Image: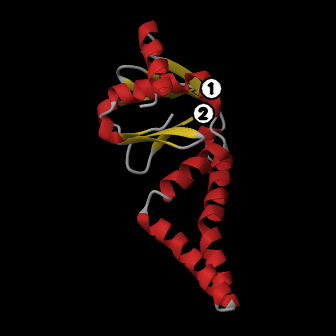
Amino acid sequence: MPRQLFIVIREVLEKGKKMLELDVKIEAKDLYDYMVAHTYSKPMNILASCFGGVLVVMGVMNSRLIFVIGGIALLLYLPWTLFLKSRQQAINNPVFKEPLHYVLDDNGITISQGDQTQSQEWGNMYKAISTSKSIIVYTSPVNATIFPRRVLGDDVARCIQIISTHMPPAKVKIRY
């Protein structure tokens, strides 16, 4: 663990802040970040991209335009469809129209919006990962709670500390 992160976590623990509350308006870029991380965590999708790259290289080396076009199509298909899908979800899903209120505490994560509240205990969390733009806590193999770093601001270390404290280390793959 980097020394700076250790110091930040120790300061948070000393202050006794064991709860984090924040309001998050999930935007299309947050959904896209999640979808890319989720999609490219699967070996088949990584292989498809590698195959696309190989096709481009082979096409250039052998002067075969069809290979270059096929490779570029394979390389661009997933990112483009994920981009379109994230925009569509951000526009059409009513959950993303209003901010979500998150509470991370010793019990788990509580999400509320309007008069609806849903809680998930830490023991039921599937895994936690991070990207350069978000901290993502999976509540199932395909569903997740997204904490955009742009919203967390100075509370990134506190969020990581709360998640890391309550989830088994094998389930937490978060980088500061």
Tell me, what colour scheme is on the image? secondary structure
Task: Sort mark 1 into few (<14), some (14-19) or many (20+) by Cα contacts within 10 Å.
Answer: few
Amino acid type of the residue that numbered disc 2 sits on in the rendered structure? Arg
Residue at horizontal 41 percent and vertical 13 percent from the top: 13
Could you tell me residue 103's position as x and y percent? Answer: 48, 22
Task: Sort mark 2 into few (<14), some (14-19) or many (20+) by Cα contacts within 10 Å.
Answer: some
Where does label 2 land, which residue? Answer: 149
Q: Which mark is residue 153?
A: 1
Amino acid type of the residue that numbered disc 1 sits on in the rendered structure? Gly
At numbered mark 1, what does the secondary structure look like: helix, strand or loop?
helix
Residue at horizontal 65 percent and vertical 57 percent from the top: 83
Whole-number angstrom distance, CA of label 2 to CA of label 1: 6 Å
Give the vertical position of 84 relative to 56 (above or below).
above
Could you tell me residue 32's position as x and y percent? Answer: 61, 50
Q: Image check: 102 left or right of 24?
A: left
Q: Nearer the viewer, residue 168 or 60?
A: 60
Dots 2, 1 in contact, CB < 8 A: yes
Residue at horizontal 56 percent and vertical 54 percent from the top: 36
Residue 155 location, quadrant: top right
Could you tell me residue 71's position as x and y percent? Answer: 62, 79
Q: Nearer the viewer, residue 129 or 144?
A: 129
